[in-house]
Amino acid sequence: MIWGQTTAGVLLGLILSAGLCGLYALLALPSFDAALMTATLLLIPLWIAIMTLSFRIRSGLRAWASLGLANLACYGLLWALRAAAVVVLPV
């Protein structure tokens, strides 16, 4: 049903777009402040794009599974970068 795709796109899409914007802000080397502002401005358009793409997936279960795996990969990478001290957050 379409409700599965909709809820996956809305809920997991928001979490994924926030994670992707966080990755961008952390990996943009020249200026953390400018990258954070750019990431904040990109959050909503990225969320809308992910919501739109969730309707391209055949079923609600597949949408939940694929967006869930994408979230795990994104936040796993964020955790790994922080744990390995590759990226040090400014104080």
Image (spheres, rainbow, N blue to C red):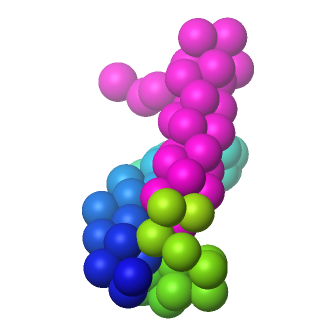
* Quarter containing the C terminus: top left
Q: Is 43 located above or below residue 1 in the figure?
A: above
Residue 21 image position (x, y, % from top left): 49, 58
Residue 14 visible to the viewer: no
Residue found 42% across the figure and 76% down from its top: 5
* Quarter containing the N terminus: bottom left
29 sits to left or right of 91: right
* Residue situated in front as seen by the camera: 76 or 81: 76
The secondary structure making up most of the magenta span is helix
Residue 82 image position (x, y, % from top left): 56, 19
* Magenta residues, start to end: 63-91
Task: Indicate whether residue 82 is drawn in magenta.
Answer: yes
Task: Indicate whether residue 61 is drawn in magenta.
Answer: no
69 sits to left or right of 42: right
Residue 18 image position (x, y, % from top left): 40, 56
Residue 34 image position (x, y, % from top left): 47, 61
Q: Is 60 located above or below residue 64 in the figure?
A: below
Q: Give the image quarter of residue 9.
A: bottom left
Q: Is 62 located above or below residue 73 in the figure?
A: below
Residue 48 visible to the viewer: yes
Residue found 58% across the figure and 63% down from its top: 62
31 sits to left or right of 10: right
* Residue situated in front as seen by the camera: 21 or 11: 11
* Residue situated in front as seen by the camera: 9 or 4: 4
Residue found 43% across the figure and 28% down from its top: 90
